[in-house]
Image (spheres, helix red, strand yellow):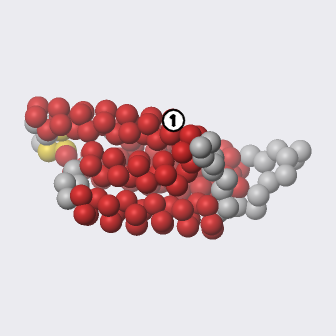
Amino acid sequence: MIMAAFGLVTMVEALRLIIYKDPYVLYDPIGPGFYVLALSVGVLSVGVVHFAANYRKGSIVADAAARGRGMRQLFSSIIVLALYLLLINFVGYLIATLLFFLLQFRVTGVKSWRTNIILTLLFTAVYYVIFVRLCEMVFPREIF
């Protein structure tokens, strides 16, 4: 329900960015509102699908052990993300992203190191091509 609510709030903000244009500001033809709108639709969809899949007979079915496992996974993901945010300024985008995906796939349950490394290399390459090459985003370079 939180994901669906977050999706709705960000969708409203995206629509505000799309509709309201300040006449004193130069805008990109697509603008940030369309990107935020696309992400908010995705978040809203994930929230609704998750809620619908776990909703039965008027209550959400949740086992205490599964809830505890989910909370550990959530906090581990937050720690991995915080580590990524700290490392990106020191070791640069590429190395920090490799380490992030390597740890994040372990947290999400990828047990095989071979599969983990293949997925890490694949995702890092795809993100690099999309964000650095195609979108020309500037990411921090390493200090060392």
Residue at x 20% of width, y 59% of height: 112
The reply, left or right, for residue 135 in relation to residue 75 is right
The reply, left or right, for residue 143 in relation to residue 102 is right
Residue furthest out toward the front: 144
Are there few (<14), some (14-19), or many (20+) residues within 10 Å of tag 1?
A: few
Residue at x 85% of width, y 52% of height: 26
**What x and y, as percent, mark residue 69?**
18, 37
**What x and y, as percent, mark residue 67?**
17, 34
Quarter in which the N terminus is drawn: top left
**What x and y, as percent, mark residue 3?**
38, 41
Residue closer to the observer: 64 or 117: 117
Residue at x 56% of width, y 40% of height: 90
Residue corresponding to mark 1: 86
**What x and y, as percent, mark residue 53?**
21, 51
Above or below: residue 93 compared with residue 114: above
Residue closer to the observer: 64 or 123: 123
Q: Report which quarter residue 121 is drawn in.
A: bottom left
Residue at x 27% of width, y 45% of height: 107
Residue closer to the observer: 105 or 12: 105
Under mark 1, the amino acid is Leu
Residue closer to the observer: 123 or 53: 123
Q: Is residue 30 visible?
A: yes
Mark 1 element type: helix
Q: Is residue 5 visible?
A: no
Above or below: residue 7 compared with residue 125: above
